[in-house]
Image (tube, helix red, strand yellow):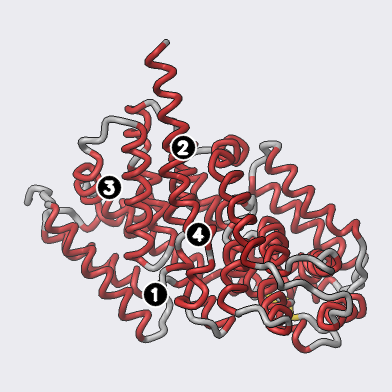
């Protein structure tokens, strides 16, 4: 039997092949799942030639997928919940009251604030852009706001979903990979979140001077009227997402929390919106489509349900299968160790983590790999330098996760371009939060850990 021997050259070959497969999928407008599937097959065959047995390689993939089984369930639950929160009137209520408080405000700042708030409860950045974001974009065009600037503000707010929303699939992937909890990680994230959010709001305040919503803003009122005609709206509806947020912060596990949010939405859909049980189940599985008097609003009140999330599950499963294969056979460790081998300080480690996560997000066109690989492989190094996994989760979230919409070939940017009709190059310069977070992680986040280290040394 041949000895199992892999080299850095093998890692480079697989990386290049993966990029080629991803590029092919983008050019052919095919799902990224196929690129990861081809990459897994390619890596599998290469590792067979290096002496690994077919059984051992199969076990590596299987073990990685089994470890992430709860996360796959969570993704499907999120798909069902978003649809039910639409059918129950929860999301329409958030849109209705959000528009109500936009009167006479700096529109650009209002768009950022409302989008960021909605993002926390919707739980997906792309979902936020495609609902409240598209509504704000249409209204803002009527007030003469440059569409690239406005979409940049919307994207900035929306991507807080992937970073801090308790029902975000990506955040929960980060938490499960780094073995941290939402409550403790949120405290760590506050070190960068609070200053970055305030600075971003200040920038949009300055950029948005002169773009205010007049009192007779007909478009806003048209949307609100259509919502009232299509749903029974009450401030009490806002208690459901608020309750989910409170449970998560309190430390209740995410799957039971989301399940309660889903059950609550089902009860409201049947009791308050007078939907039949069959229609509710249909919305959960196949998605919800608004049926109001406004055609434009109906395009916004849309979710694909569980069926639409199957592709997401397959893409994430492909990324996990590939990373599990490369991790367990030692290839990724070979490359990552080369990058972090000489790292001795906390500041250096945070810098290297941000670089690794960002490069992986850029190279693979998806955030999952930029979360999974550094999240799994750097935990030991964080322990060595005296940092905990909360700092690892925060750094990944502030870098590889948040930069996705700025990369023209990333799946996030491609979807945003498709649903808005605006190219990445036009909105990216104004998506300031997505730039400031990586800088803050290196400057502020690193500074916090550096100060902590200085205090320990003095003691």
Mark 2 or 3, closer to the camera: 2
Identify the disc placed on residue 391.
2
Q: Residue at x 32, y 65 (%)?
A: 363
Q: Is residue 7 visible?
A: yes
Q: Residue at x 22, y 42 (%)?
A: 337
Residue ID for mark 4: 434
Callout 3: few (<14), some (14-19), or many (20+) C-alpha neighbours within 10 Å? some
Residue ID for mark 1: 409
Question: Is 444 placed left or right of 334 in the picture?
Answer: right
Taking depth in this image into account, of 41 and 164 the one nearest to the observer is: 164
For residue 139, which quarter of the picture? Answer: bottom right
Asked if disc 4 and disc 3 are in contact, CB closer than 8 Å, the reply is no
Asked if disc 2 and disc 4 are in contact, CB closer than 8 Å, the reply is no
Residue ID for mark 3: 328
> Is the C terminus in the top left, top right, bottom left or bottom right quadrant?
top left
Callout 1: few (<14), some (14-19), or many (20+) C-alpha neighbours within 10 Å? many
Q: CA distance from mark 4 to mark 3?
A: 33 Å
């Amino acid at each position: 039997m041949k000895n199992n021997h892999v080299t850095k050259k093998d890692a480079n070959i697989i990386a290049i092949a993966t990029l080629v497969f991803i590029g092919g999928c983008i050019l052919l407008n095919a799902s990224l799942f196929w690129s990861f599937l081809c990459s897994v097959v390619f890596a599998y065959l290469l590792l067979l030639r290096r002496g690994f047995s077919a059984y051992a390689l199969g076990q590596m993939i299987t073990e990685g997928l089994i470890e992430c089984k709860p996360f796959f369930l969570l993704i499907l639950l999120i798909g069902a919940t978003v649809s039910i929160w639409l059918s129950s009137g929860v999301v329409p209520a958030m849109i209705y009251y959000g528009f109500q408080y936009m009167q006479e405000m700096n529109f650009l700042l209002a768009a950022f604030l409302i989008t960021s708030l909605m993002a926390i409860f919707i739980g997906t950045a792309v979902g936020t852009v495609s609902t409240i974001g598209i509504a704000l974009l249409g209204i803002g065009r009527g007030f003469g706001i440059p569409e690239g600037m406005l979409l940049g503000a919307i994207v900035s707010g929306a991507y807080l979903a992937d970073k801090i929303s308790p029902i975000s699939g990506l955040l929960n992937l980060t938490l499960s990979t780094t073995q941290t909890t939402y409550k403790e990680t949120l405290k760590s994230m506050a070190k960068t979140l609070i200053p970055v959010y305030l600075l971003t709001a200040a920038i949009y305040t300055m950029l948005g001077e002169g773009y205010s919503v007049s009192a007779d803003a007909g478009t806003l009122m048209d949307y609100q009227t259509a919502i009232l005609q299509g749903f029974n709206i009450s401030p009490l509806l806002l208690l459901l997402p608020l309750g989910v947020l409170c449970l998560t912060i309190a430390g209740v596990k995410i799957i039971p929390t989301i399940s309660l949010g889903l059950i609550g939405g089902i009860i409201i859909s049947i009791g308050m919106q007078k939907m039949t049980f069959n229609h509710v189940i249909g919305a959960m599985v196949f998605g919800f489509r608004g049926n109001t008097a406004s055609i434009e609003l109906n395009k916004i009140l849309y979710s694909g349900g569980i069926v639409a999330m199957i592709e997401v599950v397959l893409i994430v499963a492909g990324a996990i299968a590939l990373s599990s294969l490369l991790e367990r056979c030692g290839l990724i460790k070979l490359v990552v160790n080369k990058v972090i081998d000489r790292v001795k300080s906390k500041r250096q480690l945070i810098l290297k983590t941000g670089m690794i996560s960002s490069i992986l997000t850029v190279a693979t066109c998806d955030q999952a790999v930029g979360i999974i690989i550094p999240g799994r492989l750097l935990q030991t190094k964080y322990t060595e330098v005296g940092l905990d996994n909360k700092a690892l989760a925060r750094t990944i979230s502030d870098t590889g996760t948040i930069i996705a919409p700025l990369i023209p070939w990333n799946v996030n940017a491609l979807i945003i371009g498709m649903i808005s009709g605006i190219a990445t190059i036009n909105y990216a310069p104004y998506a300031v939060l997505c730039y400031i977070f990586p800088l803050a992680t290196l400057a502020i986040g690193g500074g916090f850990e550096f100060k902590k280290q200085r205090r320990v040394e003095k003691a």
